């Protein structure tokens, strides 16, 4: 398609086909079966865990009545690794032994529903392994969005409850809520989930931003997405998408990376 | 309208998979449709990894409901579209596409139209991808997006207008 003269519709078709031409990831139906099995197992386990938790809570209450000096916090592992990121700005992190390849900040402006947020993103490598960290502010609500899929298993990172996604090819993803931010680690070329989590737990908060030679210029996004989809009407009338005014574009061209 | 009731459409891949359900079941559906579903999800969300997750999740849903779903391919496609739209709405992921492009998730070749696509509202992007990549008629796009045909026409019209505006020198 001659992009200079072809109708926009044809240009769009050509663009979509070109970008869709990327090689799809290797995948197998057994990955899906594993996912479903995990999901089912989790559903079976949750009520059992709940029952155990009720019993355990009863035991704890009884114990506390007898010994007020003893306290218990289920999410903490005494003597285990800890992680306390700064609360007054982007979470600066280092991962000892790994090569930081890139650091970027994505800044979303405040809108009617949400305050302004900054999302730091790191990319490290170590040999053939790759690790990415994206930090999503937004508290528990954002954590729930990130782990929305049921096809996960529970894990502990820094002694905190975390959600593990095993892609089945040496790639793992973990989401853990620390303070008010969800730390989402995504790694490849790991022999096991344990190795992946052990690598994550080496990460430490730092006081300052990564060095300038790996730091991309912050990306300020000023895009409004004012699309509301009405709920179906009681009479079965199909819902109608109402497109409100789109009130912005990216404020400036995307900065270059490393 | 329920998800199960959405018509399959007429793509060759979907037809081949449809004919093979009875003998080989889920594995055939997966093998025959994965690439296409992944590409659709990628065009909708613009992120390889997110697309993979969206698609795997959609297949999981299909597998879980295998016995109850009459047309798994149709159910699969609408699930992929819905999950992708959820991602766009919930994470405002569209706005991150420019950054993702630079880190190699998408073709690094400059493409103003592709960049402009990432600036559209999720519903506009979805309508354009279904209309011009999947080549679905307005009626089928409306069924997939659960909106009226008039709304699809409006989304397409305004989406194209926005793209035209953005790529003008």
Image (spheres, coloured by chain):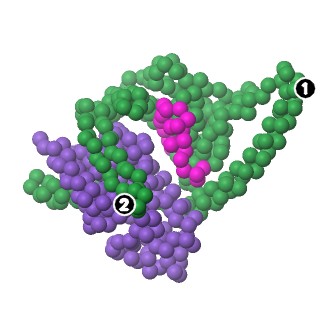
Which quarter of the figure has residue B16?
bottom left
Name the residue tied to disc 1.
A66
Q: CB under 8 Å between callouts 2 and 1? A: no
The hue used for chain B is purple
Query: Which residue appears at 32% of the width and 41% of the height?
Result: A226
The image shows residue B88, relative to residue B31, as above or below, that is above
Would you place residue A21 above or below residue A203 in this image? Answer: below
Where does residue A100 sit, x and y in percent of width and height? 46, 31
> Which chain hosts label 1?
A
Estimate how packed mark 2 is, as few (under 14), some (14 to 19) or many (20 or more) residues with alpha carbons within 10 Å. Answer: some
Q: Is residue B40 visible?
A: no
Chain bearing tag 2 is A
User: Among all residues in the image, which is located at the extreme left?
Assistant: A5
- In the picture as drawn, the residue positioned furthest to the front comes out as A235
In this view, the residue in front, B31 or B127, is: B127
The local secondary structure at tag 1 comes to helix
Q: Is residue B108 above or below residue A19?
A: above
Q: Secondary structure at mark 2?
A: loop
In percent of width and height, residue A24 lies at: 41, 59
Q: Position of residue A231 (x, y in %)?
A: 41, 52
* Quarter of the rendering occupied by the N terminus of chain A: bottom left
Residue A161 lies in what quarter of the image?
A: top right
Chain part drawn in magenta: A127-152
Is B109 part of what is drawn in magenta? no
Q: Identify residue for label 2.
A: A238
Q: Nearer the viewer, residue A26 or B169?
A: B169
In this rendered view, identify the residue nearer to me: B165 or B153: B153
Q: Quadrant of the C terminus of chain A?
A: top left
């Amino acid at each position: 398609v001659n992009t200079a003269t072809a109708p926009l519709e044809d240009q769009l078709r050509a663009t979509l086909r070109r970008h869709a031409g990327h090689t799809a990831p290797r995948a197998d139906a057994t990955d899906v079966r594993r996912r479903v099995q995990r999901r089912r197992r989790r559903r079976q386990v949750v009520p059992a865990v709940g029952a155990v938790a009720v019993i355990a809570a009863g035991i704890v209450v009884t114990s506390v009545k007898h010994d007020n000096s003893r306290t218990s916090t289920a999410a903490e592992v005494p003597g285990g690794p800890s992680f306390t990121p700064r609360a007054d700005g982007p979470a600066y992190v280092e991962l000892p032994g790994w090569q930081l390849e890139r650091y970027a900040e994505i800044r979303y402006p405040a809108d009617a529903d949400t305050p302004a947020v900054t999302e730091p993103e790191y990319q490290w490598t170590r040999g053939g392994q790759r690790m990415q960290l994206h930090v999503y502010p937004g508290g528990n609500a954002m954590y729930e969005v990130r782990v929305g899929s049921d096809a996960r298993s529970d894990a502990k990172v820094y002694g905190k409850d975390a959600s593990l996604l095993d892609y089945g090819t040496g790639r793992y993803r973990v989401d853990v809520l620390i303070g008010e931010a969800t730390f989402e680690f995504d790694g490849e070329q790991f022999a096991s989930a344990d190795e992946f989590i052990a690598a994550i737990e080496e990460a430490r908060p730092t006081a300052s931003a990564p060095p300038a030679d790996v730091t991309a210029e912050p990306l300020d996004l000023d895009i409004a997405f004012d699309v509301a989809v009405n709920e179906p009407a009681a009479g079965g009338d199909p819902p109608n998408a109402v497109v409100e005014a789109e009130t912005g574009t990216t404020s400036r061209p995307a900065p270059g990376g490393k | 309208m329920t998800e199960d009731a959405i018509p399959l459409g007429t793509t060759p891949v979907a037809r081949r998979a449809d004919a093979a359900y009875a003998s080989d079941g889920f594995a055939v559906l997966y093998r025959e449709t994965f690439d296409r579903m992944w590409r659709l999800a990628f065009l909708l969300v613009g992120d390889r990894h997110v697309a993979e997750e969206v698609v795997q999740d959609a297949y999981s849903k299909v597998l879980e409901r295998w016995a109850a779903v009459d047309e798994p391919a149709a159910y699969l496609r609408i699930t992929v579209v819905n999950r992708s739209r959820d991602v766009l709405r919930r994470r405002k992921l569209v706005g991150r596409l420019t950054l993702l492009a630079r880190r190699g998730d998408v073709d690094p070749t400059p493409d103003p139209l592709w960049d402009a696509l990432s600036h559209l509202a999720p519903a506009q992007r979805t309508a354009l991808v279904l209309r011009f990549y999947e080549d679905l008629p307005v009626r089928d796009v409306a069924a997939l997006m659960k909106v009226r045909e008039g709304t699809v026409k409006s989304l397409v019209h305004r989406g194209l207008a926005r793209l035209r505006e953005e790529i003008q020198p």
